[in-house]
Amino acid sequence: MQLNRWNYYSDFVVYPAVVLALSGLALHITPVADWWRCGLLFVAGAIAWTLAEYGLHRFVFHRIPGIREMHEAHHHDQRALIGTSTFVSAPGCLAVMLPPLWLIGGSAFAFGLTGGFLLGYLCYVSVHHLVHHRPARPGSAFFALKRRHALHHHVTPEGNFGVTSGFWDRVFGTEIQLRQRGVAPVPSQPQMRHAAEE
Ligand SMILES: [Zn+2]
Ligand SMILES: [Zn+2]
């Protein structure tokens, strides 16, 4: 949905606080000798996010009526402040993730995994915002991120679903291959400049 600036940018304030709170709770209730377990859970949660990011973009944002139209609005106006309100996504994630994880592995398990997962989400919204609002220096890692997402927007929405990582696109065969699609294998410099400026 179209958000006002306050609602759009609140992700970048609320999510760091939630991630810090969950990490702090996980460490607080775990003996110091077992803090490494919290670290592993946190990393596992962040990795799980990258798969969720891929699956949500491919099967929810581009498929589910209602959500699809909202995502199409982003495809049509890439700089518009379109997204999910923090005050819907944060309580929603916590309500969906914490109770089942708590039942499965206890409180530290739930706090650690959810904290890592939401750190992954924070990375996703940050990278997605930056690729659409900041220029990139050709050859930089950020340029590669921008280019991959620009191909999703400008070549076909049926590929490059990962925003923070191309890993799952390579695993599931949805990485956009310009040669196979009969598109010029190397985008012209004006095209790349255009993509880099979005
Ligand atoms: Zn985008
Ligand atoms: Zn998309």
Image (cartoon, helix red, strand yellow):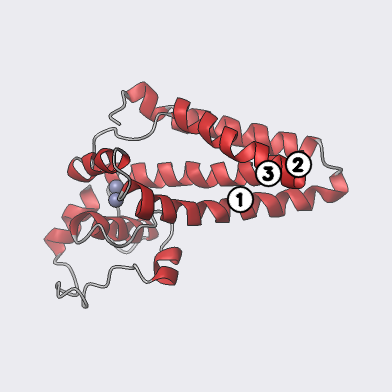
Image coordinates for residue 165, horizontal then vertical, percent: 43, 59
Ranked by sequence position, the earlier of labels 3 and 2 is: 3
Give the residue type at disc 2. Ala
Q: Residues within 10 Å of mark 1 (few under 14, many from 20)?
A: many
Of the image marks 1 and 2, the number of the one nearer the N terminus: 1
Q: Is residue 147 left or right of residue 94?
A: left
88 or 132: nearer the eye? Answer: 88
The residue wearing badge 3 is 101
* Residue shown at 49% from the left, 41% from the top: 122
Residue at image location 18% in from the left, 43% down from the top: 76
Q: Residue at x 61, y 46 (%)?
A: 116
Q: Mark 3 and 1 residues: CB-CB less than 8 Å, in contact?
A: no
Residue that numbered label 1 is attached to: 45
Q: What separation in Å lies between label 3 and label 2 (alpha carbons)? A: 9 Å
At 22% across and 47% down in the image, what residue appears?
Answer: 198
Residue 8 lies in quadrant: top left
Circle 3 or circle 1, nearest the eye: 3
CB at disc 2 and ligand 1 closer than 8 Å: no
Say what secondary structure mark 1 lies in. helix
Confirm or reject: label 3 Cβ below 8 Å from ligand 2. no
Is there CB contact under 8 Å for labels 1 and 2?
no
The percent coordinates of residue 100 (x first, y second) are 66, 42
Specify whether 21 is left or right of 198: right
- Which residue is disc 2 drawn over? 108
The tag earlier along the polypeptide, 3 or 1, is: 1
Instruction: Name the foreground residue: 42 vs 193.
Output: 42
Which corner quadrant of the image does residue 192 belong to?
A: bottom left
